[in-house]
Image (spheres, helix red, strand yellow):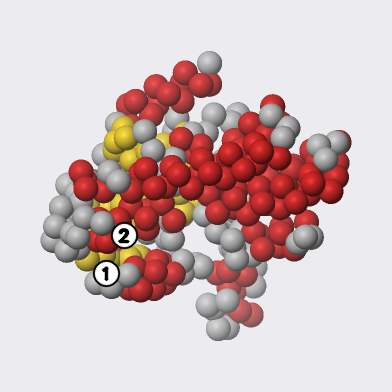
Amino acid sequence: MKSLHRTIADIRKIKIQGANEIAIHSLCFLKQYVKQHGFGKDFEIVAKKLEKVRPTAVVLHNCLEILRKEKKSSTVDKLIRTINSAREKESKYSDKIIRSQSVIMTYCHSGEAMSFIKHSWTRHKKKISVIACLTEPKQQGVLTAKDLSLEGIPVTLIDDNAIGYFIKGVDMVVVGADALRLEGLVNKIGTRLLAIAASSAHKPFYIVANSLKLDTRENFKIEERSSREILRKIINKEKINGIEIRNPAFDITPWELVTAVITERGIISPEKIKKELLYEKN
């Protein structure tokens, strides 16, 4: 069994990335853990350590809340199936959103957004092309571009600063989510600027996200990562001594900038998402 230390390191270093992938990876570890140690008090310690690694993404938190109520190994399997089947169900709605000849802009590297876009290409045979944003500072957009290119989808990789230049030529924006909160969409830093650009150009902005991303946590914080992720690109580091560097990993996009959320239950308006969050919170 992979050690807890190794599992945490893989998630922290973004070898495992995306809210769903973090949850699945952690659940797979916990399944092996409970086989050996059960659901005793040490289970809660281990669960909390995993949850703290990437505190903004909510899927693992919601899965752990369910697992705490249903302490069975079969619950872990059920949760993993739920995440994977949700992605398949979401993808089927691509036919209702994506038209042939569409140019789609996307951001970061979202498994759900990728499945949604790929489904229109492979299953519905839509002739589409994609503009993938680089997504600084970790450049996850490179993974997105490679992923889509392997499917044969025409893809163009652009710098984040070029979003405003290209946005008028796209038909829609499709992104994933780390959490859906009353305040708005929580996603990779820069998503809010992309949504503003899309709104300014009158382009629809879609989120692909399963119901486990509904986030009613009171104790919520935006993860800030190491300044080294930014500093690695600065050649003369000694010249910036005394300058504070901040590196938030996520931002919040207000719901008024969102066209719709594609979930496993269908295409849902931002107003309905907010009502669901209010209901669950109360």
Up-down relation of residue 232 to residue 185 (above or below): below
Determine the residue positioned at 48% across, 48% down: 84
Q: Position of residue 18 (x, y in %)?
A: 52, 54
Q: Position of residue 209 (x, y in %)?
A: 41, 43
Please indicate whether residue 122 sits to the left or right of residue 71 in the image: left
Residue 61 appears in view: no
Determine the residue positioned at 44% across, 56% down: 111
Q: Amino acid at mark 2?
A: Lys
Determine the residue positioned at 33% across, 52% down: 116
Q: Position of residue 23 (x, y in %)?
A: 60, 48
Determine the residue positioned at 75% across, 51% down: 32
Please indicate whether residue 186 sits to the left or right of residue 27 in the image: left
Q: If you read the primary sequence from the N terminus, does the residue marked by circle 1 or circle 2 appear first?
A: 2
Q: Decide: marks 1, 2 in contact (CB < 8 A)?
A: yes
Residue where numbered disc 2 is placed: 118
Outermost top residue: 282
Residue 135 appears in view: yes
Please indicate whether residue 17 sits to the left or right of residue 13 in the image: left
Q: Nearer the viewer, residue 63 or 31?
A: 31
Residue where numbered disc 1 is placed: 153
